[in-house]
Structure formats: C-alpha cells, structure tokens
C-alpha cells in the first residue's frame, strides 16, 4: 500500500499514538520502558506495525527493542528515516521479476537508463543466473517463501515489476508480503501477462516430454534459438524452465484479490496473448488507481523497448500519490 513518510514535526506524536494504542493506555509516560508498561514480544510486533502505519516506513524490530522508551525511540527514528535523494524525490526500489525460464539479468540494462530516484533491483529465481546452483522450485508457495526474503520492506518505498510469468509472481509476492504483516508495495507494474483469473493455460505444457516441451518453447519465442539448438545446454535448462511452467500451469489465484496499491499494466501492440483488452482486466485487482499503456512490439517487447518501459514506469511512479512523487 502507498505510504507517505510523516513530516518531522509529527513523528514524535505518531510514536506516542502507536505506543498508546499497542499497550491500550490512555496516557503514556515518555521515559517509561515499553516492557515495564506491559509490553511483550508479541506486542512488540504489533507496535512495529502501528509505527509503520503512522510513520510511513518500517522501523526495524531490533531498533524498537533496544530503544524501549518513547524518547529513545523518537531519537532513533530521526537517525534511520529514509532520506530523500537529490531532485526532491525519495529513493524508490523497484524489484523486477523475469519471465518463465529467464534470468533476472534481463533487467541489467535498466540501471543505466533509470532516473536517479529509481533503484532497479533484479530478483533472481533459483536455478538461473547468479543462483544457477540452487534447485529450481516448482511450487508457488515455496517460491514465494524464497522470493520474499529478497525484498527489503524496511527502508525506502518499493514497487514490484514483472513481465509475463514474472507479473503473476510479482502480484502474488506483493500479497504474500502484506499477509506476513509487512509493508506492501507502493506500486505494481504488470507487463505482457494475462490477469490472474485468465493466467492459467488451458493446455498444460510442463509435463510434456522433452522434445514436445522444446517445440513449445520454440513456438513461444521467448527462449534464445541458440539455446534451444544446444542439446547439452537444454539438459541443464529444461528442469529450470519446466519448474516455472509447472507453477503457471497449476496456478490458481488465492487469497484477497486486491493488491492494495496502484497498478500499471503494459501491453505490446502486437501481442496476441495479452493485448489491451486482456491487460485492462488487471483493473479488478486493485482498489487503488489503475492505468494501462501500450508499448510497440510483440509479447517480448521487454527486449526491444527498454528505455520506453523504464520511462513509462518512472512516470507512473511519480504520478501516483505516495513516496515516489515529487515533494
């Protein structure tokens, strides 16, 4: 969900309110120890959530534990509050998830064209790229367990970007973080991906024999031809790609549909699978603002329109209400 970082003059009052709410006290003595006033480890987590809601950023649990009075915590908060970057915009982390079988290195080029406030963070899935020695995961819940550890929700505001299969992962990952009691994303950007209720293919491919599986990959045109033609490399990569398709072919949306933040949907002008009409159905997955934009290209415009995508995403982040907007 989108949050504004509370101005300095209001932060101490916000801490007092969170403290009072958590301990269910009408008044709070600023020098009283949280634990002496009735706090415990469970209430400490509740206090963290209350502080996040009021302050606009997450205060690490250890900071609250080691600064157990309002006075001490207020001083600590001033030290760790996310700092704005030059140009008047607070730093924004954009976590980017790749399409099926692809390495997150596909986003490396974004870093050189992104505006200063936008920190592009490729999220590598197990079994490829820098994590090529890790076992690929074929279960969505297991993969979300893995990916959630890569998202830092405690500092700068963040958003999630996913292309094709990666968009489903981004959507489910955002919901997972919220269900775990963590701050949700400030924005979700979905690219070339049918919305959850239409995402599961009618005909599964994950369990096809290797030669049929390779033919299907060739039809989809998302796997480099030189890789498909190399039998030895395909022995390595088929288990990785098959794991992704196992998740997609068995995907069933679960939990609350609303991601709780603005959503931008990008679609290729010549994409027969996820065109404008299909992509606009993502509107049903947020109670916040929704916008859609066409990018020239087919389903894999991700490779041919890097600068346009990054520019469009940056414009979206600065237009929606929240931490990424100009101050």
Image: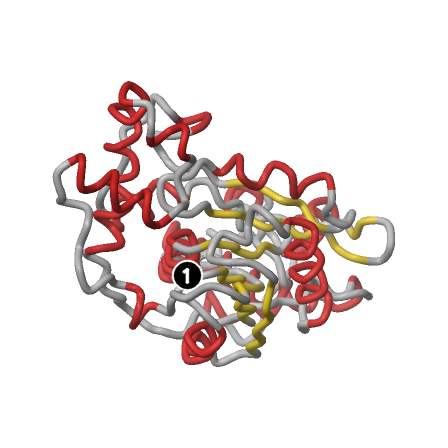
Relative to 92, is 187 above or below?
Answer: below
Q: Residue at x 29, y 34 (%)?
A: 240
Foreground: 99 or 147?
Answer: 99
Report the residue marked by disc 1.
171
Q: Residue at x 28, y 24 (%)?
A: 236
Q: Residue at x 67, y 52 (%)?
A: 92
Task: Give the image location of residue 219, x and y in percent.
Answer: 32, 48
Q: Is residue 201 visible?
A: yes
The quarter of the picture where the C terminus appears is bottom right
- Report whether 130 appears left or right of 317: left
Foreground: 123 or 38?
Answer: 123
Q: Residue furthest top?
A: 232
Foreground: 249 or 186?
Answer: 249
Task: Give the image location of residue 17, x and y in percent.
Answer: 59, 70
Task: Give the image location of residue 318, x and y in percent.
Answer: 73, 65
Task: Give the image location of residue 162, x and y in percent.
Answer: 48, 54
- Report whether 243 appears left or right of 90: left
> Which secondary structure lies at badge 1?
helix
Color theme of the render:
secondary structure
- Report whether 72 appears left or right of 38: right
Quadrant for residue 248, please give it: bottom left
Relative to 158, is 202 above or below?
Answer: below
Relative to 157, is 24 above or below?
Answer: below
- Report whether 123 appears left or right of 291: left
Quadrant for residue 132, please give it: top left
How many numbered dots are placed on residues in this image? Answer: 1
Dot 1 crowding, Cα within 10 Å, few <14, some 14–19, many 20+: many
Q: Is residue 12 visible?
A: no
Q: Residue at x 52, y 55 (%)?
A: 160
């Amino acid at each position: 969900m989108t949050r504004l970082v509370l101005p300095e003059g209001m932060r101490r009052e916000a801490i007092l309110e969170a403290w009072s709410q958590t301990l269910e006290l009408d008044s709070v003595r600023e020098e009283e120890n949280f634990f002496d006033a009735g706090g415990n480890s469970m209430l400490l987590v509740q206090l963290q959530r209350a502080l996040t809601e009021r302050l606009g950023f997450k205060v690490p649990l250890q900071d609250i534990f080691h600064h157990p009075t309002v006075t001490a915590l207020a001083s600590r908060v001033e030290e760790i509050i996310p700092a704005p970057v030059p140009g008047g915009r607070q730093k924004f982390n954009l976590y980017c998830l790749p399409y099926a079988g692809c390495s997150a290195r596909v986003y490396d080029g974004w870093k050189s064209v992104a505006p200063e406030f936008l920190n592009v963070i490729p999220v590598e899935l197990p079994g490829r790229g820098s994590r090529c020695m890790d076992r690929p995961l074929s279960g969505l819940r297991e993969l979300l367990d893995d990916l959630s550890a890569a998202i830092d929700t405690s500092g700068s505001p963040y958003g999630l970007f996913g292309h094709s299969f990666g968009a489903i992962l981004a959507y489910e990952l955002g919901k997972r973080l919220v269900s775990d009691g963590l701050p949700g994303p400030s924005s979700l950007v979905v690219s070339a991906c049918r919305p959850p209720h239409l995402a599961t293919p009618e005909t599964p491919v994950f369990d096809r024999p290797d030669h049929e599986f390779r033919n299907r990959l060739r039809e989809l045109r998302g796997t480099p031809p030189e890789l498909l033609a190399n039998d030895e490399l395909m022995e390595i990569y088929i288990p990785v790609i098959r794991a992704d398709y196992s998740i997609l072919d068995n995907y069933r949306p679960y939990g609350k549909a609303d991601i709780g933040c603005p959503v931008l949907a990008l679609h290729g002008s010549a994409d027969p699978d996820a065109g404008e009409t299909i992509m606009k159905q993502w509107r049903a997955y947020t109670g916040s603002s929704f916008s859609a934009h066409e990018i020239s290209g087919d389903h894999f415009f991700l490779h041919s329109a890097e600068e346009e995508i990054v520019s469009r995403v940056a414009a979206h982040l600065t237009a929606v209400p929240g931490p990424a907007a100009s101050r």
